[in-house]
Image (spheres, rainbow, N blue to C red):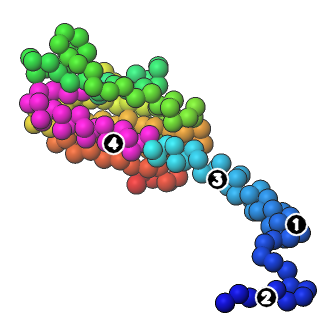
Amino acid sequence: MQFKKRPGMRSGGFTLIELLATSAILSILMSFAIPAFSRWVPGYKLRGASRELYSDFAMARMTAVNQKGECALVFDKNNNRYEIWACGPNKIFENGSGDDAPLKTVELSRYGNGIRYGHGGASSPIGETFGDDITFSWNRLVFDSGGMLKGFPGYVYLQNNRNASYALGVLGSGVISLKRWTGTKWQ
């Protein structure tokens, strides 16, 4: 069955006025959304960098257990990066020399210019001091073959250009923690 078009009835589609009105409304909405989104981006980038570092702590710990030898994260504050190293056949991490093998290098700058080592707006450290924003001895974290921390517990602090900060730490037992500065305390 075919329908006949009645006189005065228009066919489907939009008029130019309807399209212009819709475009104007979308433009107005976008003018509010884009600035709000740009305020959120630094926080998302910092959270992403912190979560990747947390995952890399866990990867280093599991690598040490699986290979029955030491695995280390070495923090390079001057170049704003860190590296993960696995030990060689001697099962001991020797500062990246000898038979140690690099597994991964992470440049914090890939998350944006504002992501770097630092405690941001945090006014109190976890533990006694912020140190140099990396409180592990010799700016490195080493897991032994049992997944336990070799050396003293410590933290690494990351911040963005809005002074937000996260702290990632490892206890002697190998337990990894991730904390965010809320403006008054670490949570």
Q: Which residues make up the magenta segment?
A: 49-72
Q: Report the mark closest to the observer, 1 or 3.
A: 1
Quadrant assignment, res 157: top left
Q: Secondary structure at mark 2?
A: loop
Q: Secondary structure at mark 3?
A: helix
> Would residue 121 appear left or right of 145 to someone viewing this image?
right
Q: Residue at x 35, y 31 (%)?
A: 135
Q: Secondary structure at mark 1?
A: helix
Disc 2 to disc 1: CB gap under 8 Å: no
Q: Report the mark closest to the observer, 4 or 3.
A: 3
Q: Report the mark closest to the observer, 3 or 2.
A: 2
Disc 4 to disc 3: CB gap under 8 Å: no
Disc 1 to disc 3: CB gap under 8 Å: no
Q: Secondary structure at mark 4?
A: helix
- Report the amino acid beneath label 2: Lys
Could you say where residue 108 lies in the image, as x and y percent from the top left? 47, 31
